Image (cartoon, grey):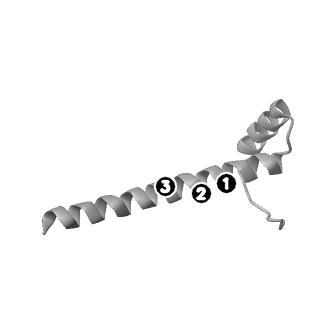
Amino acid sequence: MKRCNMFLPEDLIEKYRVMASEKGVSSAEMTRIAMEKYHLAYQKAKKHTSDMQQAEAQHGS
């Protein structure tokens, strides 16, 4: 893994610390999990948009 510094609002950092403590993981682990989930959701939405555009192109011709 590679280290990455991020600038986040203090209230968000505190929320992360509380959640991480409740889950028994580090804030870094919470961030990694959140970024992985966001990336998967982004890829899914991107594919859905592409599929919809292809379907519209096929039905439009």
Q: Is residue 3 above or below residue 36?
A: below
The answer to which of 32 and 13 lies nearer the viewer is 32
- Of residue 57 and residue 1, the one placed in the foreground of this image is 57
Inter-mark Cα distance, 1 to 3: 14 Å
Decide: is 22 above or below 57.
above
Mark 1 residue element: helix
> Relative to residue 10, is residue 35 drawn left or right?
left
The residue under label 3 is which amino acid type? Answer: Lys
Residue pointed to by mark 2: 39
Are the residues flagged by discs 1 and 3 in contact, CB closer than 8 Å? no
Does label 2 or label 3 sit earlier along the sequence?
2
Local SS, label 2? helix
Separation of residues labelled 2 and 1 (CA atoms): 6 Å
Numbered circle sitting on residue 35: 1
**Quadrant of the image containing the N terminus:** bottom right
**Circle 3 crowding by C-alpha within 10 Å: few under 14, some 14–19, many from 20:** few
Circle number at residue 44: 3
- Look at label 2 and name its amino acid: His
